[in-house]
Amino acid sequence: MRWSPGGRSRHLEDRRGRGFGGPAGIGGGILALILALIFGPQVLDQSDGTTTTDAYGEVGLAPADSAAEEPMVQFMSFLLDDIQQTWDGAFGRAGGSYRPATLVLFRDGTRSACGIGQSAMGPFYCPLDEKVYLDLGFFEELDRRFGAPGDFAQAYVVAHELGHHVQHLTGLAERVRGFQRSDPDIANELSVRLELQADCYAGVWAHSAAERGMLETGDVEEGLNAASAVGDDRIQRRTTGSLNVDSFTHGSATQRAEWFTRGYRAGNSTACDTFRAG
């Protein structure tokens, strides 16, 4: 992917040096336990020996590690601004106003308005504080464990999470959560539709990036591979050896790649109405 390093976005919040190594709290502990039950206990083992702990038990990034990650931080900053500028333009053309989200980089664990975030949870968006939370170590997992390497695979992840911010700004996410609360039997199905729409929104941004000459040969394939790699069916087969379609919350590998492709081909969010699709 073609991009130009340019420092850090004003919408990026770097907490890598002020995480914490102690108990993550009840909320984070429960979420991590759920992930462990789904993906296996290995997801809780995120230690790679690169952190330091101070006298107060807070975990920080060693200086050498911080310098080594700076190119990645600048890439995340570039993506954050570029994706949000794309959506700002789209909202403006539709007569609306886009409010930027913040990208929080952390190491191991951090607090959010939605509870304690942990690396084992993977990247996530919190609508209560309008922030995307990301441990850069996730990209190593995306490459090594999920078989989805490449800078555009990483770009897909950021674009997908910011797609959830778009859903929040339009009010769709809150309406869907209301339906989920009123009818728990369809909660998973609605969750899948939200996630697929976020995949489609990532494709919409990819279309814009392609039009502006930012994509290189193989980038779209990297994005499709990443979308497929985190499909519920592939994760379940890899971690449990079995398949339970009723427990899907993000969509199958085929569905995720399909909706990313829809957004990429159309280049317009009107193609992303997963709630009207059959």
Image (cartoon, grey):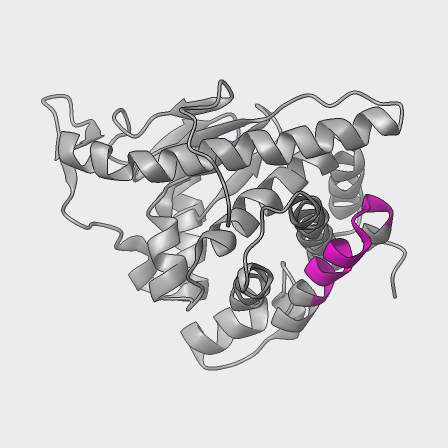
Is 93 included in the stretch rendered in magenta? no
User: Eyeballing the image, is 176 above or below 80?
Assistant: below
Quarter of the image for residue 134 reads top left
Side of 66 where 215 appears, left or right: right
Residue 21 shows in this picture: no
Residue in the picture at 45% in, 52% down: 151
Side of 240 where 170 appears, left or right: right
State the quadrant of the C terminus.
Answer: bottom right
Please provide percent x and percent y for residue 23.
27, 36
Q: Residue furthest top?
A: 10
Please provide percent x and percent y for residue 190.
75, 54
Q: Main secondary structure of the magenta part?
A: helix
Please provide percent x and percent y for residue 208.
70, 44
Is 263 included in the stretch rendered in magenta? yes
Which residues are drawn in magenta?
258-270
Please provide percent x and percent y for residue 4.
46, 35
Residue in the picture at 78% in, 43% down: 176
Quarter of the image for residue 7 reads top left
User: Eyeballing the image, is 63 above or below 148?
Assistant: above
User: Eyeballing the image, is 12 above or below 205?
Assistant: above
Side of 85 where 138 appears, left or right: left
